[in-house]
Image: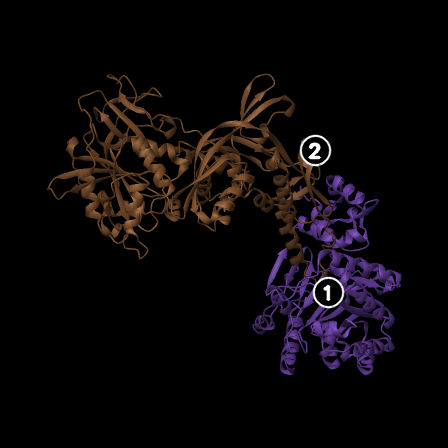
Chain colours: A purple, B brown
Amino acid sequence: MSDFDGPGLYIHVPFCTHICPYCDFSVLTGDRSWQTRYLQHLSLEIELLTESGWPELVREPPSEAFDTIYFGGGTPSMLPPGNLESILEAVRAKMHVRENAWLFLEANPEDVTLKAATTWRQMGFRTISLGVQSFAEDNLAFLGRQHSPRAARRGLDNALAAGFDTVAMDLIYGIPDQSPRAWQSDLDEALAAGPHHLSCYQLTVHPRTPFGFRQLRGEMMEMDNDDQAELFMLTHRHLAAGGMPGYEVSNFAAGPQHRSLHNQKYWSHSPYLGLGPSAHSFARGRRWWNPRKIKAWMAPLDAGRPPLESVEELGLESLVLESLMLGLRTYDGVDFDNLPGGLGPALWRDNRATIDELVKRGLATVDRSRLRPTLAGLAIADTVARSLDLGGLRNEPT
Amino acid sequence: MVADRGTPSVDSIRNFCIIAHIDHGKSTLADRLIQSCGAVEDREFRDQILDSMDIERERGITIKSNTVTLLYEAQDGNRYTLNLIDTPGHVDFSHEVRRSLMSCEGALLLVDASQGVEAQTVANLYLALEYDLELVPVINKIDLPSADIERAREEISEDLGLDPYEAVLCSAKQGIGIEDVLEAVVHKLPPPIGDPEAKLQALIFDAQYDPYRGVVMICRVKDGRLRPGQRIRLMHSDKEFEVEEVGQLQLRRVKTDELSAGAVGYVIAGIKTVRDIAIGDTITEARHPAEEPLPGYKEAKPVVFSSIYPMSTDDYEDLTTALDKLALNDAALTYEKDSSVALGFGFRCGFLGLLHLDVVQERLKREYGLSLILSAPSVRYEITLQSGEEIAVDNPTLYPDPSQIQSATEPYIKASIMMPERYIGVVMELCREKRGLNTTFNYLSVGRVELTSELPLAEVLFDFYDKLKTVTQGYGSFDYEMLDYRPTDLVKVDILVNGEPVDALSQLVHRDMSRARALRYCERLEETIPRQQFKIAIQGAIGGQIIARSTINAYRKDVTAKCYGGDITRKRKLLEKQREGKKRMKVVGAVEIPQSAFMAVLTSDTQK
């Protein structure tokens, strides 16, 4: 990551043509007038930033320039290129953005025409991420996706042809009754399409989503734990064999250069700023976030105030817990010598027995001060994180 | 309230109780009698006044007996003092029943017009006859469409041997015939016999605790007089106190100048806790003591034992305080410190029976807001060691090394089960399953059967009520009395989680039942212990021998799929919450056992 260790910028574009039944993100299916209002308010939010390019509540804003800009959603590809362009202009005018900042765009496969892809590429987008979800017709129907497998392939071809540095794609697995064989053939299709990056998310049923309600009514059952584990292992093994090794629980890249620079900032407590409804930000031991609902996000902006929902001061214990929890989700694991507050060595000592046990059970390996999960360990990363005792740490704001 | 401060003459006193089968309307009748004597205003009338504990009112049973004095102006124009001595309706409290009966000269024997005579009615009748009480049968619930008064009369005659035409008809619920009942009390029950000038003898048959006045003894004066200022001696405990106040119990306490022979009332004598007195003890005057105490003193011995632990170890102090307070007015409850590796500090408690256990547990929960875990109820075993020494063991953790044991005995009860005859087969089978001996039955009336069986109490503690209710579809009623101790082949079953014994789950059982019991515990644990990062072996063992086992497979997938978008706070908070939850789990052999697992295993049919 060496060259890109500055702050990252996230811009949430909360529009979709259709809301998927599993999604618990902040999205709406508004018409054009909503988009106009959104864009107006986004520029208000940018305007409210201080000279440093950070909100007022950041005491000593990071001096480094932003080196990633990520358009996520929702469906940023729904915004006309002209609008994306003006957002970027506003951002560049107000904030310190590195010249060759890495730009990311999430896209619906149908939106990725060769023309659109070329335009985005010319605007400086280097990674495009397509929400393919599956190449199987029945899975797409179950997931409420509007595109066909053919449209997904076409979108990918166009993205590749436009010459993005990284063409990424999202897949969902662990759909009720999905067999290992069916999932493997989905993976094969994905590999055959030739992307540089894959995110494979195991289906999670969130409360207050259509799937959540279906589950409550007993119409849908989450996959059995052992079966989930089998698919998880299969995913990591099969993709590694196909030249796309994993580097995190759900992320796979054809080479280190294709790993998501932006997402890695979240996992390593690099500073990041989020704009738009529901966006989260983090800097100097503080995390803050905007209201989820677009109206609640717009109202304070209309009154000339930043759209804050909450601010959280992270104590040392929270920072350490996050470092462990996020680090143990990655193939690289956690380097205890690099834990916040220099607490690693003491923590290692306190957890010596647990660490030995993890190694003995084949859930982790130890490489000097680094605890690295094995694949089996990765599959139960939450359990592993819980098993470490933070006992003596005091939770004081840093 | 204006007190009638004069001492009623012995002839105008009637001391009586109501005996009935559960549900036959005893409390309702008592309420009506109180109401019609004007002891309470209608608007402050609360149904079942005598059942003062919430639990009693909810379950419609009387646990703690209450006594009330009614002032009744009879049709003959005379005023009578009627002392209604309420008796507890449950077998766990039969010692209290006996003492209550000893304080009466007569009893109303209540029979439900539609149910007829039941097992308890018969049992209570024999008790009443034992104490030579005059009996008046009362047929209640005559207003019900299903009432069959003639059949009830027939049963009174045949099953109870009483004159059916003496029976008073009433409906306590509708207030029909209440006057007739009161007239029968006055005219058919005898006044007490006693000599106010003789040496003082008063039987303590109940006690209450008043946070301001200390212990309030409820007693029946046989001979002599009790007055404030008097120096009294409790004959069994040989303790002396000075009487501060005496009076009648008219729902509220009403001070009087004295209680003389034949009277029933309360005595306050600056006594701090109910432990300082013994129910059944005799009060006499310190300076001129009676030669002999009255009969009726019998120590209430606990027969069921269980360890009570606070759900959160932080609540131990609160539990201590709660038990201390509870014990102030529950002299039968015993408790001593206990500790478990898995559950921390708690108390080993002794109870008169399962209902008593249940009541104590409920009160701790409701009145003191405590969340508790109770270990499986146990009986007290008597064990003879090789050395010849005899010990009593009611706690599996204190069970001696089997090689040192020569023999063991366990308590048996005589169970009496009443049911429609169609259930005889299944109930006999149930008794056989529960190691019942000498199971016999006889017909009480056409279609109704009473089955008796000699059962080990330990088997009754485990699952018996539940099964009885199930197999008789709710039609079986159950009652029991303690019999004796008999030889048993006792083993201690340990439950091991990954090879480590969970002490709170150990139990003493008969060898024949050990495998089934161990299997059941293993299965319940398997259902309730969540998967962990390694395989968990659950075993039931007698010593080194494994008799039951089950396995919980390792958790193989436990990771959130998506963790970005910067919303790491939510994920961390979830993890923090889980870590908190983990702290409340009990760790045995590196396995985290949630409290729900202990609850699932230990919750017996009595605790539902």
Left or right, B227 with reference to A176: left
Note whether residue B358 is visible. Answer: yes
Q: Helix or strand or loop: what does disc 2 sit on?
A: strand
Q: Helix or strand or loop: what does disc 1 sit on?
A: loop
Which quadrant of the structure image shows residue A232?
Answer: bottom right
Reply above or below: B425 against B101: below
- Within 10 Å of disc 2 (Cα), the crowding (few <14, some 14-19, many 20+) is few
The chain under label 2 reads: B
Left or right, B142 with reference to B76: right
- The image shows residue A170 at horizontal and vertical percentages of 77, 68
- The image shows residue B468 at horizontal and vertical percentages of 49, 45
Left or right, B509 with reference to B445: right
- Within 10 Å of disc 1 (Cα), the crowding (few <14, some 14-19, many 20+) is few
- The image shows residue B58 at horizontal and vertical percentages of 39, 48
What residue lies at 89% left-to-right and 63% top-to-bottom? A243
Tell which of B183 and B305 is nearer to you.
Answer: B183
The chain under label 1 reads: A
Tell which of A219 and A204 is nearer to you.
Answer: A219
Q: Which mark is residue B451?
A: none
Where is mark 2, residue-wise? B545
Of the residues shown, which amino acid type is indicated by label 2? Gln
Where is mark 1, residue-wise? A177
Which mark lies nearer to you, 2 or 1?
2
Of the residues shown, which amino acid type is indicated by label 1? Asp
